[in-house]
Image (cartoon, rainbow, N blue to C red):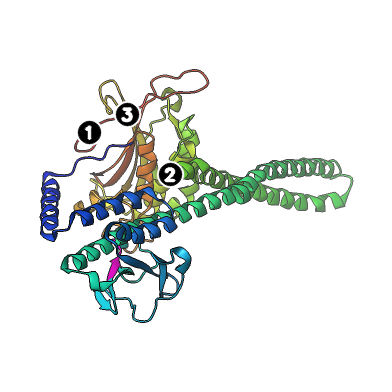
Amino acid sequence: MSIICPASSQESGSVFARVRKKREDYEHYGFSVLQDRALRAFFDLAQEYETMDNFYRVCVYVPKDFLGFDSCLYLVDSETRELRMACDTLSGLSVCGNPAPEGIHLSGESYETKDSFIAPIRGNFRLFSRKPLNYAEDVIGLFEVFPLSRFDARDRLFFEKYANRIGYSLHYKLIAEQDQRHLTFINTLVADIEHNVIAPNIRYRVFFLKLQKILDQIREVSGTWRAVIEAHLDACDRARDLMPLNERLNEALDRLAKEYERLEKHYQNTSLFLESLFRREHFTKGELVLQRRMCNFRRRVIDPQLDRYRERLERKGIRIDDLMGGVPDEDIPLFVDIGLISQVYANFFSNAEKYCREVQNEQGEYVKFMAYGREVIADFFGSGRPGIKFNVFTTGPHILPEDRAHLFEEGFRGGDSESVPGTGHGLHFVKKVVEVHGGVVGYEPVFLGNNFYFVLPLLEHVEGEGLSIDRPDTYEAPQGGI
């Protein structure tokens, strides 16, 4: 279980003041011993029983047993918007679904009708703003208590507060129920994707292998046919006429082979992303689950993504600079989830295509380029724990200072990006992937443009077939960027 960082002293003071105010409120209420016990029993039992049916029973049976009042719980139907009975002390759950009797109407204020007292049941305002249910208003039901003739002033206040407690508990249960439905749907959907998308997609690998064999056979036949034509050029005029046709055939074959290569690369990349994003473990554990593999980082991660974006970058006049300096990757042990880390570079290169702008360099020349590189940083994650910094730089005006701290937040888009299509999700995804690898992400304004980077811990040793990585459990990121 992760530890949540303590709140600021100002927030702590606010909570303490609220606790004191609540104590004063209860002293002011002046509830009887039985009323206090009834509230405590309700809270205990509302948490003990998980099903909605038993929760409805608890709502009406606690006042009956502790205070001798009969009651009825009414809830707003989320689809019809009508007020319906849920449970009462006279007939239990057999009344569930019946329409409210005459004189019982939805209201945001307590009221009396005949020999009954009616208190509104409200949901949790914070939860309405966070996870709205299918209720348009904050009043999600009513709590009826009778006989009114036995009431005194304290009973009215008590049952208003009791109805509030029902509302808070009920809203949490409704959200939990809704979340469970969503989780069930998501898990079913993932199983469907695995069965109907990913598994059939894997079969395309066989299709590409067969297609490659067919292309090789056509190329072999074309070569044989050319040899036959050349052997008869002197003896047969018709052979000379066939030579241009053979050249056209070879040209078409070359174009087909290039399209095949592009299609296969697209398939490989799409498969990589599908299989890493829709991994069943992500959904069963509720977090990104890595499948680490030792790899040549440049060849397996960077180059395939750069190949995808190279033509698009060049089409926009963006020159590509490789700052890796030709250093072989094999001397740096990297143990990563190739599919997920590849999507980090896909996001960086996509942003480079969108946001790279022309600037004037120190010689007064206008330049527009993207550069990518890496750097080993000793002791980045602590003494004896080096990190490797990967970066993607693009020319252009610096990101606004007020936006820099929010770049990796979900849904955030800078003030200068309104004209550029996007959702604000990409960099947040980058942050999650890098952090689950034990790394950090960052941004720094540099000469001529903007530098986005991430730093991963370096592998210190490898053990047998089950490759292991020494990764920091805790670390402090360097102050002031890298």
| Above or below, 219 relative to 460 | below
Question: Callout 1 environment at 10 Å: few (<14), some (14 to 19), or many (20+)?
Answer: few
Q: Where's residue 188, x and y in %?
A: 55, 51
State which mark lies toward you, 3 or 2. Answer: 2
Distance (Cα) linking label 1 and label 2: 30 Å
- Mark 1 falls on what kind of element? loop
Q: Nearer the viewer, residue 82 or 138?
A: 82
State which mark lies toward you, 1 or 3. Answer: 3
Residue at coordinates 26% horizontally, 51% vertically from top-left? 40
Identify the amino acid type marked 3. Asp
Q: Which residue is mark 1?
A: 478
**N-term-proximal mark, 3 vs 2:** 2
Query: What is the residue that sits farthest to the right in this orientation?
Result: 235
Q: Where's residue 463, x and y in %?
A: 47, 18
Res 162 → quadrant: bottom left
Question: Callout 2 environment at 10 Å: few (<14), some (14 to 19), or many (20+)?
Answer: few
Residue at coordinates 14% horizontally, 56% vertically from top-left? 26
Q: Which residue is mark 3?
A: 473
Magenta stretch?
A: 119-126
Q: Which residue is mark 2?
A: 286
Quadrant of the rendering where the C terminus is positioned: top left
Is residue 211 highlighted in magenta? no
